[in-house]
Image (cartoon, helix red, strand yellow):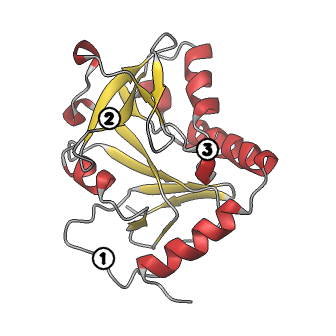
């Protein structure tokens, strides 16, 4: 199998599109269960979580968000907002009362509120969407570089964990890693946890 990002992206997108809504829901719940079973969620001060792009069958992060709120865990949540320049993200606190709007990409986003902005340096952990990854933690996303730029601004001790609905083992190595790519520390698939460091 080809291990270029473009080839892996095409294959993963096609397979993810083929998942039924029930499969997406079941696999997303498995990812949430694995996160709570394997990571110290309640000990983080700030967790960054992406909100799912349903049209692309992204992992549904709402089950884990609602569990954090239902159990009244002390961790605070932040979610991204794509900026008008189309290349940068800002991050805002996500609470049960945060108003959301749908971007023109179809992504739910917090309404921008300067008082609720969260700096990347505040984050203890980041959940990262992906389509595939390799055994070094290098990820395949949509190719826009949003997350690499964002992760590069986080603290060196922040934990980066990918969420993948496809139950794939990491490929041995991506053929086209860039110097600006930021590797993950771990990846969750419905079948288990992959640790890279």
Q: CA distance from mark 2 to mark 3?
A: 26 Å
N-terminal of the pair, mark 2 or mark 3, is 3
N-terminal of the pair, mark 1 or mark 3, is 3
Instruction: Give the crowd class for mark 2: few <14, some 14-19, many >=20 residues within 10 Å.
Output: many
Residue 54 circle label: 3
Residue tagged by mark 1? 177
Q: What residue is rendered at 62% in x and 39% in y? A: 32
Quarter of the rendering occupied by the N terminus: bottom right
**Residue lying furthest bottom:** 1
**Residue 51 percent coordinates (x, y):** 50, 36
**Residue 148 percent coordinates (x, y):** 28, 56
Quarter of the rendering occupied by the C terminus: bottom left
Q: Is residue 34 left or right of residue 21?
A: left
Residue tagged by mark 2? 124
Instruction: Give the crowd class for mark 3: few <14, some 14-19, many >=20 residues within 10 Å.
Output: some
N-terminal of the pair, mark 2 or mark 1, is 2
Rendered view: 164 above or below 100:
below
């Amino acid at each position: 199998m080809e291990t270029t990002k473009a080839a892996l992206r095409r294959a993963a997108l096609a397979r993810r599109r083929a998942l039924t809504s029930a499969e997406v829901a079941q696999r997303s719940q498995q990812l949430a269960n694995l996160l709570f079973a394997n990571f110290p969620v309640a000990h983080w001060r700030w967790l960054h979580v992406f909100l799912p792009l349903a049209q692309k069958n992204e992992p549904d992060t709402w089950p884990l968000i609602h569990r954090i709120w239902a159990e009244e865990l002390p961790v605070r949540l932040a979610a991204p907002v794509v900026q008008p320049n189309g290349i940068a993200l800002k991050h805002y606190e996500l609470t049960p009362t945060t108003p959301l709007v749908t971007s023109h990409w179809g992504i739910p986003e917090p309404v921008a509120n300067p008082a609720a902005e969260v700096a990347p340096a505040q984050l203890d952990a980041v959940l990262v969407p992906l389509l595939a990854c390799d055994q070094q933690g290098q990820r395949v996303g949509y190719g826009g570089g949003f997350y690499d730029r964002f992760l590069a601004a986080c603290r060196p001790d922040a934990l980066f964990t990918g969420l993948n609905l496809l139950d794939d083992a990491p490929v041995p190595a991506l053929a086209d890693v860039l110097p600006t790519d930021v590797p993950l520390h771990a990846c969750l698939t419905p079948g288990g946890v992959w640790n890279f460091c």
